[in-house]
Amino acid sequence: MAYVAIADRDHEHELHDPHSWIRKYVWSQDHKVIAIQYAVVATAIGLVALVMSVLMRLQLGFPDTFKLIAPEHYYQFITMHGMIMVIYLLTALFLGGFGNYLIPLMLGSRDMVFPYMNMLSFWFYLLAVLILVAGMFVPGGPTGAGWTLYPPQAILPGTPGVTWGILCMLASLAVFIIAFTMGGLNYVTTVLQARCRGMTFMRMPLSVWGIFTASILGLLAFPALFVSAIMMALDSTIGTSFFLPAVNSMGENLKYSGGSPLLFQHLFWFFGHPEVYIVALPAFGIVSDLLSTHARRNIFGYRMMVWAILAIGVLSFVVWAHHMYISGMNPYFGFFFATTTLIIAVPTAIKVYNWVLTIWKGDVHLTVPMLFAIGFIFTFVNGGLTGLFLGNVTVDVPLSGTYFVVAHFHMVMGVSPIMVVFGAIYHWYPKITGRMFDETLGKVHFWATFLGTYAIYLPMHYLGILGVPRRYYAYGDSISFIPESVHLANEWITISAVIVAAIQLVFLYNLIWSYFRGAKADPNPWRATTLEWQTPDTPPKHGNWGKDLPVVYRWAYDYSVPGAKEDFIPQNVPPSSDTPAGHDHGHGAKT
Amino acid sequence: MSLTVAYSALITGILVWLVLVTRFRTKSWEPLGVTAEIDGQRFPPQRVGLWVFLAVVTSLFGLFIAAFFMRMGHDVVAPDWKPFPEPMILWINTAALIIGSVAMQWARSSVAKGDAVSTRRALIVAGVMTLAFLVGQVLAWRLMIMSGYFQPYNPAVAFFYLLTLLHALHVIGGMVVWVRMLLRMRAVNAAPPATEAVDVRRRFRLSVELCTVYWHYLLFVWLVVFALLLTHSIDSEFVFDRLC
């Protein structure tokens, strides 16, 4: 197991090269195979969640038309859509997928430091997904408690899936957390211990910084979800009253007494808010690398970017209760959490400025990955700005229950990370498969998704300001303050959503078709500097680097260095007259 | 009041942060002459992995303990929180776990000296004492049920079971590693005595060291959990009187 621990011990790795097909592609300990396994499972379950969102939109846009969507189904769709997208898709894809693929390759190591545990991590993740899916078929169906699973309603009669659905959900989450812990230990330890020679911390690409910090956040925050899942499962099965207060349900007094629903909310959001950054930080890191590579410029303010990632990571642990302004907690806490929320906007804004300054006057190549990266800046700024509104208690209180919140979090942590996921998949596709994707289809995919995003979420902001409540199955005539135009907007949103969802099939088609029929890819088609593009084989073989590990001489952003022959110098190229160090950049060539 | 504390904590955090970031002053884009040696590889990754794992476990227990206090209530204890006397056997269990931890430390120093026999002996003592702790915990749970205090809807009881069970599960995880290590040692036993000292040191020093760290850590967690349960049990005043 230790053969990759010290990255130089390459003579040992021959011994571990798997030969059988099963060991190579199924029970594989190779980080690249595990990454693809993670990505495929995450995409598959993500498609289920996508279909659910379409079904919800059909109900909202055209109520009374689709009789098969009963109210309880609507709530089950909401719950599963949210949970799947946040945890089983985005977290798994960014850390299990990109983390696994990129960390060893970008750091010049042969594999993760604990490959066996890495393999277990994937299989536990698959088990978690299977339990989740099983929960959709148990009697009563999946839970319809909303993705936050707030007690007491999550485990009281009247909520869909109160018997088995909620237990499947909690069990699935617990297994997912075990899977994540095994993966996260690997990511963190690999970054700390298995960098190749010359790869100092401050030479690591920002993708690795983002994934590394997010893994630490995950390791410390997921236990909060674990704690709440265990305690809620006990409340629901053996009748403890951790979260359940004295309640009268369906006309009878239950034996619960004195439990604290607020305690659940604190635990849930102590996980839930870092979770936002577990998804966002890898996206921040990856998008920095995409922008820099495709604009042929060094990242603006590399050190500032690293500090900002770490600052966001630390601050993300002290903002959780801004999700609970209307929960009935001590109002003074709201004051504190509003302050911290506004403070966290500072490093985030620094990052946005630096992205813009990176591409400012750069040699921007509007490739498909670059389009998605620029698209991300737009959606992220939009979502971030509405976040400033909602971070303030006084503004949040009236808006909290409305579509404004739906628009906000979909822009900031739904669409924005997904934009990066798409950009990243297009960016690394040639390395992963050895084939190029279809550029035209990629551009169609981008424009439809990007414009479609605005078609869907921009009107929702207005709905929210009008006071249209979220979480409603239908808006009957009894809700008199909702004008006719809201229904029209809902129809428009639904039609846009259906189109955007359908366009994702083009993306899948492109990936699958190109895998078999795409043009053979150059080993470094984007002329990038980071190590994963400098592997001897494309796609990289087991052990990544052939006989000798790379040695790193420079940071990851030597683009357009004055005096250099090419407009990029890979990290493993030693300094010479043709490949000067990047510090001359911006000051004109020194003679 | 709590708001003042929160804000001062936040300001302290920001100040500490500012001090920390000065450590990241390297200008990444400047050449460092030849390749810079990296400092991360002085430790074996297993050791780093264990410490990261302990951070995760700390977070887990910390959150359970935070939940314990929040459920109990801040100013007034929640009316349904009914303290109960802790089973006395917990004191014996604690002693067993302490002896286990000491024996682990003994194994650690033996393996450093290359003394295979004494290492094995110490490991067996540590394992048996830890097993005794686990058996004792099971007895404590049974005692609770027999004495009629087992009422899941009483949060004090629920937390007692939750915390002790969670701790026991972590101890069992340690025991699995312990069994694997003993089996590996038995396999190596056939080695000729002349090389044994070098061999046991080379092969088992890290494993024994990591086990020792884990054992000490779980002892620490147990002491915290035990103290928590004692100070909130029905006879806590009695215990304090006796201790002071």
Image: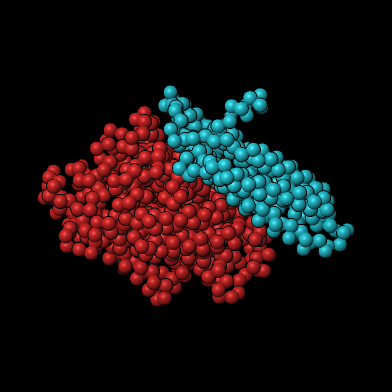
Chain colours: A red, B cyan
Relative image position of residue A452 (x, y in whole percent): 25, 57
The residue sitting at the front extreme is B147
Residue A119 in sight from this viewpoint: yes
Relative image position of residue A242 (x, y in whole percent): 44, 42
Question: What residue sits 49% from the left and 35% below the top?
Answer: B82
The image quadrant where one finds the N terminus of chain B is top left
Relative image position of residue B212 (x, y in whole percent): 70, 46
Relative to residue A249, is residue B241 depicted above or below? above
Question: What residue sits 44% from the left and 36% below the top?
Answer: B80
Question: What residue sits 44% from the left and 64% below the top?
Answer: A130
Disc count in the image?
0
The image quadrant where one finds the C terminus of chain B is top right
The residue sitting at the right extreme is B194
Q: Left or right of B204: which side holds A497?
A: left
Viewer-proximal residue among B150 and B58:
B150
Relative to residue A386, is residue B241 depicted above or below? above
Relative image position of residue A466 (x, y in whole percent): 18, 43
Q: Left or right of B117: which side holds A438?
A: left
Viewer-proximal residue among B226 and B23:
B226
